[in-house]
Amino acid sequence: MRSSRRSLVDPFIVMDVMEAARRLEDAGRHVIHMEVGQPGTGAPVAAAEALNRAMAAGPLGYTVALGLPELRARIARMYGDWYNVDLDPNRVVITPGSSGGFLLSFTALFDTGDRVGIGAPGYPSYRQILRALDLQPVDLPTALENRYQPVPQDFAGMNLAGLMVASPANPTGTMLDRPAMRALIEAAQAQEASFISDEIYHGIEYEAKAVTSLQITDDAYVINSFSKYFSMTGWRVGWMVVPEDHVRIVERIAQNMFICAPHASQIAALAAMDAEDELQANMAVYRANRDLMLSGLPEAGFTRIAPPDGAFYVYADVSDLTQDSRAFAAEILEQAGVSVTPGLDFDPERGHTTLRFSYARSTADIVEGLGRLKDFMQRR
């Protein structure tokens, strides 16, 4: 059977790494998972309790395409609490995870062949979803001196239809402050490029609160999710904030693409938003893990790292150790029993000399993983 040209997307390498780790575990090996950006904790207890009550009360069916009104209102209130932004709940769209938000955003904003700038290193699925929609991703190689975040000079004169940024970023954990965010928004607007802000790691910050683009402009798409801070990866529920005149555009596409986000997940998400004590307990784990990584990775021999401002990753330059990060990651997995992600996922041109380490799991796992890495590097 024939296949489409748009289906020729690259694999998500971290998923291949996870499969290799699973095979080792099936063979009886104990693997420490530092490859996947998934919290080691589950959804807040209140989320499961709310869903149990809803299921006992009656069947769950479709919601309206934009999502449960009470969830949209609660998200809007959060923007006031977190950022002092007065957000109209009508601009909030509930999505099937941030991935649903990317599909809706790219479909609503761009036409076939449009060029969309994305920072490199960056989340690989941006690139692959754009390609699958017959759009043209334009990698913007970012610099260490800019903390691997794009700056206006990186896309000057490129005639982009859109610019996508992430802060805190994956894989680096670096953040844009308000002047840097404003400069990118204004540079994109000068090119008449749509601005999309991936804010999925908001809430997971260490020394300063992340800046939302909504503090600067209403003329942007913001994408977020319950997967990271709210620890609900498998529930597949997220949200977008769009300009007022785009709500109906996105609604029509969502009706046809998804009908709605899962009703059960929306109920759980609403309850999760008030589980602040549990969520902050998770943050205490991430803070402890970050401290361990920033001391333990250099002790193991991974010395070229930058402290992350947010998220739960450390991105390491391993050019002094290898020119083949994929083979190096496979060696670490096989010999140390630690699963890490090669940088090729995030930067096709320069990722052969980088690795991403995730510290989203338990502190005990991080301690064990760092010990194994140190032993491995001493033997190597």
Image (cartoon, rainbow, N blue to C red):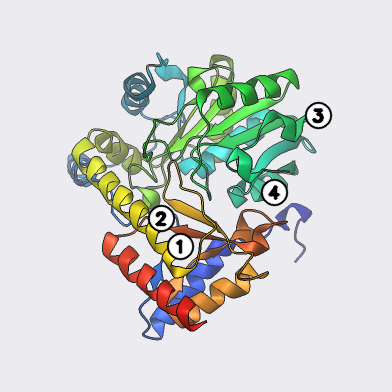
Residue drawn at x 31%, y 66% as measured from the top left: 367
- Name the image quarter holding residue 266: top left
Residue that carries the numbered disc 2 in the rendered image: 294
- Name the image quarter holding residue 292: bottom left
Distance of mark 4 from mark 1, alpha carbons? 39 Å
Residue that carries the numbered disc 4 in the rendered image: 132
Instruction: Give the amino acid at mark 2.
Output: Leu
For label 2, the crowd category at 10 Å Cα-Cα, with few meaning under 14, some 14 to 19 and many 20 or more, is: some
* Residue 237: % across, % down: 41, 41
- Name the image quarter holding residue 375: bottom left
Q: Nearer the viewer, mark 3 or mark 1?
A: 1
Checking the image for residue 159, the label placed there is 3
How many numbered marks appear?
A: 4
Distance of mark 2 from mark 1, alpha carbons? 7 Å
Instruction: Give the amino acid at mark 4.
Output: Ala
* Residue 191: % across, % down: 76, 22
